[in-house]
Image: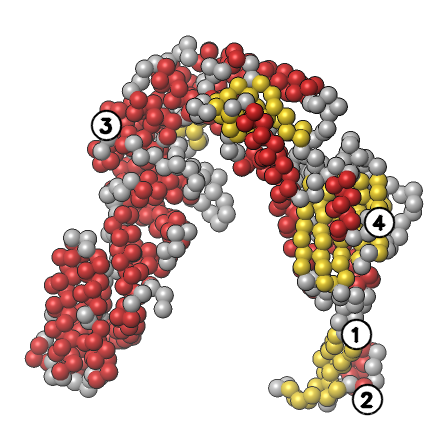
């Protein structure tokens, strides 16, 4: 067994593409090897801005021998057909096998194919790996025809410590020229040919010379000596440790930012954290503006003071060991940041000269969607909907309406034009500046939330009312014009909006039936179309399954409650689901599920045959056998007990009462023949089954629950 080391050395790969790219290439490499019978014992991959490296162990020196067979014509087929098969195989009739099949006796040609050496397979396999992978964005360079994320400069390929033969030709972008593809050899002066080698390079500036390696351990050690930290996790840890130490030196702490840490680790091969300072003149600008400017534009880490406020310091990560300790690098970054923040301060000062009402005028010329009007029209709908929702969520209607009318005003401001990610946040600051009520300002900031599963969910009543109104209007509008999500496409983020509504309702324990909510929201676009409301309910059922699946709740139980029809109170629905889940986890529950399924299956067959539905009153005079008498009595008692418990939302107790049906149901199916010879008795017993279905249906549609 041998090790295989492969490095694809290129120009700087965008940070956002590195981790996914190297993992997908590793998986593809393992799959290609496995197809050839060379499945590795282990595989690991590392990535830096300039290289994708793969180390695979336990690869056989030779692919296993294999047998290949080809079926020919029948043994009594015409001679020309047999002769043609012999020519295609290169065998004689005596070398063919005769086998009996369902189509008669057939000829079979069986060939034993010797496995190829790994060194013969790998050169072409590497080419297939590279040419077969598609990056999210690719480019061509010089006159090459190949597309790759960035110009590919060299390929290091070692198997069992030896360089693989051959190489990769990148093709030529000239008419009649070669296309991208593997060739066994290439001319030494052909710039478009990359031979496989044992050479790589270190840091672009600190150690640019080429050097040879012998194996994975030697490769990592020599890269470290050449100022390249190969491991992404190690680079991240170095950045984190250095940035935290620099923050501590000024009495602060590093602002936690995992996303930025991932990105910066993909920008440097030898991270060197340095600390800079923000001019005091900019410290009265909102902290969110400062951190957004530093993070988005400059990739700086922010520092927080011990009191929680933003510190006038930042950490920048250089990809260089500077001879002056980083003085010039820090000065340059401070100068660039000063220019960025000068713009931000200008917008901050200018925006506050106008009230939010005045900024709202700009929304009249801002189109939300061609079929749904302007943003200003959307704001009017949201405001009316928020006022309607306010008393239902315990909020003041006037405050909710006021917050909704101002919520989108900051879209017209200079600051949000420069930093779109601060919409809502800046509206809150401007609302405070003009002395709006605290709950109004807070609602402006929170009305977009929650944006995802990890985002904070608003809890303040006014914030909840406006956030719900914003999302309900979005959903109602796009469903009304039939712009629903399809497959993986969701250009208007309607799935996210639905999950946001679900979180707002569930995490605040709101009793808000969905049907009247959607009817009200859709009605603001004209007459509420029942089909649109039904489509929204179905959409929410799917989204609820997704949201609850992440919490371990079975999707079929949610469907079982939704299938009843009329149950659109999410909080009540989830209470039913919890009780149902607990009940089905018991022996009684599992047995009753089977009994109900049996009853329903019999009813489906007989109702289809008879063209009628069974259920309703039971004729006691026709109950001749003890088990059916006991079942009728138990069903009547269960219905009388379960109905009030369901109305009181005591679903656990209702399930317990349902559990008392287990023995009567089991006895009935064991001892009673449903399809009796007498028509009246048969109909009465089918009505008993209909009553089983009806009693179970008081809680959920058990027929959609998986076994």
Q: Nearer the viewer, mark 3 or mark 4?
A: 4
Location of residue 175 in the rendering, given as x and y in whole percent from the top left corner: 83, 42
Of callouts 3 and 2, the N-terminal one: 2
Disc 3/disc 1 C-alpha distance (Å) = 81 Å
Q: Which mark is residue 94?
A: 2
Labelled pair 4, 2 in contact (Cβ < 8 Å): no
Image coordinates for residue 529, horizontal then vertical, percent: 30, 42
Residue closer to the observer: 144 or 234: 234
- Are the residues at dot 3 and dot 4 in contact (C-beta closer than 8 Å)? no
Residue 104 visible? The answer is yes
Spatial CA span between label 3 and label 4? 73 Å
- x and y percent of residue 361 in the render? 39, 17
Q: Residues within 10 Å of mark 4 (few under 14, many from 20)?
A: many
- Specify whether residue 528 is in view: no
Q: Is residue 520 above or below residue 84?
A: above
Question: Which residue has dot 4 on it?
Answer: 197
For residue 218, side relative to residue 608 (left or right):
right
> For mark 3, what is the residue?
397
User: Which numbered disc flags the more N-terminal residue, 1 or 4?
Assistant: 1
Q: How far apart, in angstroms, are the residues tagged by discs 4 and 2?
A: 49 Å
CA separation in Å, label 1 and label 4: 30 Å
Along the viewing direction, whichever of 525 and 160 lies nearer the viewer? 160
């Amino acid at each position: 067994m041998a090790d295989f080391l492969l490095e694809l050395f290129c120009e700087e790969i965008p940070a956002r593409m590195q981790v996914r790219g190297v993992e997908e290439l590793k998986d593809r490499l393992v799959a290609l090897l496995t197809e050839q019978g060379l499945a590795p014992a282990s595989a690991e991959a590392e990535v830096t801005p300039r290289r994708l490296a793969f180390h695979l162990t336990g690869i056989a020196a030779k692919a296993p021998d294999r047998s290949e067979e080809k079926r020919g014509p029948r043994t009594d087929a015409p001679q020309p057909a047999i002769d043609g098969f012999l020519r295609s195989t290169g065998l004689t009739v005596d070398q063919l096998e005769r086998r009996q099949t369902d189509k008669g006796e057939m000829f079979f040609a069986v060939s034993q194919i010797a496995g190829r050496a790994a060194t013969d397979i790998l050169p072409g396999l590497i080419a297939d790996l590279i040419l077969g992978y598609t990056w999210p964005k690719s480019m061509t360079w010089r006159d090459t025809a190949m597309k790759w994320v960035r110009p590919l400069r060299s390929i290091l390929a070692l198997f069992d410590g030896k360089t693989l033969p051959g190489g990769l030709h990148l093709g030529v972008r000239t008419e009649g020229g070669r296309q991208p593809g593997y060739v066994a050899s290439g001319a030494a002066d052909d710039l478009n040919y990359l031979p496989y080698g044992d050479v790589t390079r270190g840091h672009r500036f600190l150690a640019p010379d080429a050097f040879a390696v012998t194996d994975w351990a030697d490769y990592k050690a020599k890269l470290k000596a050449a100022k390249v930290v190969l491991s992404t996790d190690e680079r991240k840890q170095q950045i984190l440790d250095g940035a935290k130490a620099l923050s501590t030196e000024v009495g602060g702490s590093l602002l936690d930012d995992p996303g930025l840490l991932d990105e910066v680790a993909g920008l440097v091969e030898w991270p060197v954290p340095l600390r800079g300072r923000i001019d005091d003149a900019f410290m009265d600008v909102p902290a969110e503006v400062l951190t957004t400017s530093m993070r988005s534009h400059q990739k700086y880490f922010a520092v927080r003071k011990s009191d929680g406020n933003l510190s006038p310091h930042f950490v920048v990560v250089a990809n260089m060991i500077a001879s002056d300790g980083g003085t010039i690098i820090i000065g340059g970054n401070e100068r660039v940041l000063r220019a960025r923040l000068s713009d931000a301060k200008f917008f901050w000062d200018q925006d506050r000269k106008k009230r939010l009402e005045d900024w709202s005028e700009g929304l009249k010329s801002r189109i939300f969607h061609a079929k749904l009007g302007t943003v200003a029209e959307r704001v009017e709908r949201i405001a009316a909907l928020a006022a309607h929702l306010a008393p239902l969520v315990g909020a003041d209607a006037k405050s909710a309406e006021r917050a909704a009318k101002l919520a989108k005003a900051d879209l017209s401001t200079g600051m949000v034009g420069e930093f779109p990610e601060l919409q809502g946040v800046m509206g809150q600051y401007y609302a405070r500046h003009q002395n709006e009520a605290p709950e109004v300002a807070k609602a402006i900031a929170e009305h977009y939330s929650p944006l995802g599963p990890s985002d904070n969910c608003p809890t303040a009543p006014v914030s909840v009312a406006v956030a719900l109104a914003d999302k309900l209007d979005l959903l109602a509008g796009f469903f009304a014009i039939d712009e629903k999500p399809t497959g993986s496409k969701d250009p208007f983020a309607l799935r996210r909006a639905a999950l946001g509504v679900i979180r707002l309702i569930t995490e605040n324990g709101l009793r808000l039936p969905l049907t009247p909510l959607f009817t009200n929201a859709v009605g603001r676009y004209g007459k509420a179309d029942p089909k649109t409301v039904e489509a929204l309910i179905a959409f929410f059922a799917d989204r609820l399954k997704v949201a609850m699946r992440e919490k371990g709740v079975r999707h079929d139980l949610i469907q079982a409650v939704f299938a009843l029809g009329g149950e659109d109170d999410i909080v009540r629905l989830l209470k039913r689901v919890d009780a149902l889940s607990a009940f089905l986890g018991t022996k009684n529950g599992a047995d009753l599920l089977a009994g109900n399924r049996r009853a329903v299956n019999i009813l489906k067959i007989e109702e289809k045959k008879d063209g009628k539905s069974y259920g309703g009153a039971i004729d006691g005079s026709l109950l001749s056998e003890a088990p059916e008498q006991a079942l009728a009595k138990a069903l009547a008692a269960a219905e009388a007990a379960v109905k009030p418990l369901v109305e009181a939302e005591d679903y656990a107790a209702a399930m317990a009462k349902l559990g008392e049906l287990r023995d009567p149901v089991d006895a009935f199916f064991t001892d009673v023949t449903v399809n009796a010879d007498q028509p009246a008795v048969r109909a009465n017993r089918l009505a008993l089954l209909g009553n089983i279905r009806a009693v179970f249906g008081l809680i959920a549609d058990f027929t959609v629950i998986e076994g």
